[in-house]
Each structure stands twice: as structure tokens, then as C-alpha cells.
Amino acid sequence: MKMDEAAIETVVTAVKESKKYGDTAEATIRELAVEALRRYKKPKQAIKAVRAQLHSIMAPYLGDPDYDAAKTMVTAVFASGDEAQVRTLCQDLMGHHLSTRERLSLLDRFYREIFAVTGKPDSLLDIACGLNPLAFPWMDLPFSTQFYAYDIHEPRIDFLNHYFRAQGLAPLARIQDVALQFPQETADVALFLKEMPRFVRNYGDLGRPLLEALRVRWLVVSYPAVSTHGGRNLTNRYREFMAQLTEGLPWTTTEILFEGELVFCIEKGGGES
Ligand SMILES: C[S@@+](CC[C@H](N)C(=O)[O-])C[C@H]1O[C@@H](n2cnc3c(N)ncnc32)[C@H](O)[C@@H]1O
């Protein structure tokens, strides 16, 4: 049966106009709208269902800076040419999103220890990036690095390209739903930080196919080591989860346990997927 295009449009428009979820990539909203309208006849119910799914996918409760103000601050701080001020601003902005806020105290060691395992990349993918590309000043990588970043939050990606340009990097941040289209770019390292549990919850069996499809030599997949609510230790649970996710694949895994974040550096081998 052909789907009612008008109903799809109604749902997409309503969600796109909402304050909380309107920043989401239209392709993501459209896909969820089509799915929701298979389950619910009335657009009103479908809109409610899409919003509920976006709550889990976009996780707006993790926080955001004011992106227009952030762009202005980035322009000003790079005009000052003061490296220390650049770092301070990047830290402040990362502090607005829980995933990066939790990593702030690790920044001096995090990429040094990861790249000690993977080697320093000439190219990297940051998948479901959030504000993590702002950690570039702590990565000790040259400005020639091909730094691709993917997210479905439109103002965030627009801001990250503004930052990349100011930083002297190519503006390679992309609005891309990686569940609808796996990244195709070839790189040395792919980061998939603190998103796999949500990804598997939202998209079911897509976790392993995503990792298999990535055209990189190294996968760097991380998990929170402690739960946000209640402070339970999650290390063993995610160790087992990661082992299951890669079971039977000829990949070599090196674990790094930071305070608060459990990181797996996985060598896919051969330099190609
Ligand atoms: C928990 S945050 C992690 C941010 C970052 N990786 C970090 O550790 O700092 C998850 C991010 O994934 C993005 N995201 C969720 N589903 C996505 C999808 N299907 N495609 C691209 N990005 C997605 C969200 O918009 C959000 O910015």
C-alpha cells in the first residue's frame, strides 16, 4: 500500500517546527515518520511516537551551548591568536554536553594513550560526534589531518565546521544519519565514543554491521565506565557486550580503562575494511 505522502509531510513539518527536536536532520525525521505512520493512522499519534524516539536518539537532555553565541566566541578567540584562550573556550563549550564534560579531566591523557596504540592518524572519522571535535587541540595532530565528523544535529554541525575553519582544518563535519547511511570515507581511525549502547537500543542489530562497514584500520569504541544515574560500575557489563559484538571477527582488541570511560582500540587489520 502506498503511504499517504500528505500525512508524512504533516508529521515531518510538525517535528521540524518543534523547539526541542526541530534541529534534527530532516532525513532522520522523515524515516521515523514513515515508520510511525505504519503503526499509527493518525498523524497526531505518529508525531508523538517520533518525538519519543528522538528523545532517545538526539538525547537533548545531554545539553548544548548556544551555537550562534559559540560561533561568535570562536571567531573572537582565534582572532586573538592566543592558544591558551582557544583551549579554554573549547573546554568551556565541551562542558555544555554531558559526554564531553565527563571527559574534560582526561583530555591531557585520552588521545595520547589511544594514539599510542593506534598510531597518530592522518585521517579520522568521529561518528555521532557531539562536541568531541573540540578536543582537537589535545590530539596533537597537524592541521592537514582529514577530520570527518558526523551527527544529525544541524546547528551543531554548522558550528563544528565554523570551528574547523577557524582552527585551520578542512570543514569536514557532516549532517549524516549513520544508521541510514554508514560513513563511506576511508581513514586510519574511527571514533565511536559513548554512543554504542544508545545506538543498539535505537537501531537494534545495526551495531556490528556499522563497525564491519567502516573503512578504517582502527576502531575506537568507548563506553561510560560508571552509570550516569546511581554511579553503578558498568565495566564488566560493557566488556562482555563488546566481546559479543565482535565475536568471531578476526580483530585484535586493546582495552584502555580511564577513570569514567572504558575504551576499546580494535585493529581491523589489513588497512582496509
Ligand atoms: C552521547 S552523544 C556522544 C557524543 C560524542 N561521541 C562524545 O562521546 O562526546 C551522541 C551523539 O550521537 C548523535 N547521534 C545519535 N544518533 C545518530 C545517528 N543515527 N547518526 C548520527 N549521529 C547520531 C547525537 O545527536 C549526539 O550528538
Image (spheres, rainbow, N blue to C red):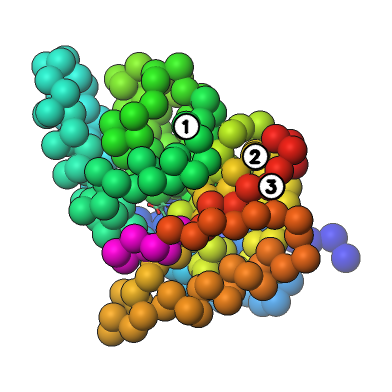
Tag 2–tag 3 contact (CB < 8 Å)? yes
Q: Residue 76, located in which quarter of the rendered image? A: top left
Mark sitting on residue 217:
2
**Image quadrant containing the N terminus:** bottom right
Indicate left or right for 138 with 33 as reference.
left
- Secondary structure beneath dot 3 equals loop
On the question of residue 171 being in view, the answer is yes
User: Which three-letter amino acid code belongs to the residue tagged 1?
Assistant: Lys
Callout 2: few (<14), some (14-19), or many (20+) C-alpha neighbours within 10 Å?
Answer: many
User: Label 1's element?
Assistant: loop
Residue 8 makes an appearance in the image? no
* Quadrant (top left, top right, bottom left, bottom right) of the C terminus: top right
Residue 53 x, y percent position in the rendering: 53, 69
Q: 10 Å neighbourhood of mark 1: few (<14), some, or many (≥20)? A: some
The answer to which of 88 and 270 lies nearer the viewer is 270
Of pointers 2 and 3, the one earlier in the residue sequence: 2
Secondary structure character of the magenta stretch overall:
strand
Q: Are marks 3 and 1 in contact (CB under 8 Å)?
A: no
For this view, does 12 lie left or right of residue 94? right
State which region is magenta.
257-263
The crowding category of the residue bearing disc 3, from other C-alpha atoms within 10 Å (few below 14, some 14 to 19, many at least 20), is many
